[in-house]
Image (cartoon, rainbow, N blue to C red):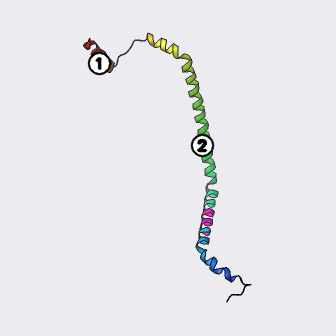
């Protein structure tokens, strides 16, 4: 029989949860490995992040250009419509066939 003063009475409990402890140790090991990888590849990650920021800045510039072009279009749209009315209309074969079909019907 085990006396009350010894810590041996908690041993079966420890054995019962040993797989859980193993799992915890495995998770700790995985975390250590991930930290090591992160430490190893950190400079490359920072470089990639800088590249991403540069690309993002380029995208924002392009977006601003598009918005400017859109504003110009909205500004000059009526003039463009008026000017396009003066241009000779080039008929595609499909529209030409459509007109011919309308003429044949009447």
Please state, as top left, top right, bottom left or bottom right, where the C terminus lies in the image: top left
Classify mark 2: residues with Cα within 10 Å, few (<14), some (14-19) or many (20+).
few
Furthest residue toward top: 86
Q: Is residue 79 found inside the magenta-colored segment of the image?
A: no
Mark drawn on residue 97? 1
Identify which residue is drawn at 59% across, 35% down: 58
Identify which residue is drawn at 52% across, 14% down: 78
Task: Give the answer, above or below, for where 76 lies relative to 54.
Answer: above
Mark drawn on residue 17? none
Which range of residues does the magenta coloring cover? 25-33
Q: Compute the Cα span from label 2 to label 1.
A: 52 Å
Furthest residue toward right: 5
Identify which residue is drawn at 61% across, 39% down: 54
Residue 40, horizontal then vertical, whole percent: 62, 58
Instruction: Identify the image quadrant of residue 92.
Output: top left
* Left or right relative to 50: residue 78: left
* Left or right relative to 67: residue 94: left
Name the residue tied to disc 2: 52
Please state, as top left, top right, bottom left or bottom right, where the N terminus lies in the image: bottom right
* Left or right relative to 9: residue 66: left
Q: Main secondary structure of the magenta part?
A: helix
The first of marks 2 and 1 along the sequence is 2
Foreground: 67 or 41? 67
Q: Secondary structure at mark 1?
A: helix
Foreground: 35 or 27? 27
Instruction: Identify the image quadrant of residue 6.
Output: bottom right
* Left or right relative to 21: residue 83: left
Task: Give the answer, above or below, for where 9 lies relative to 41.
Answer: below
What is the number of callouts on the image?
Answer: 2
Residue 4, horizontal then vertical, whole percent: 73, 85
Residue 85, horizontal then vertical, whole percent: 44, 11
Instruction: Identify the image quadrant of residue 100.
Output: top left
């Amino acid at each position: 029989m085990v006396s009350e003063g010894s810590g041996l009475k908690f041993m079966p409990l420890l054995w019962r949860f040993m797989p859980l402890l193993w799992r915890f140790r495995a998770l700790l090991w995985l975390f250590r490995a991930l930290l090591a990888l992160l430490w190893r590849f950190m400079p490359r990650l920072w470089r990639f992040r800088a590249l991403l920021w540069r690309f993002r800045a380029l995208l924002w510039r392009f977006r601003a250009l598009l918005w400017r072009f859109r504003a110009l279009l909205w500004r000059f749209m009526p003039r463009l419509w008026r000017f396009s009315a003066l241009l000779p209309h080039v008929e595609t074969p499909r529209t030409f066939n459509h007109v011919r079909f309308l003429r044949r019907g009447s």
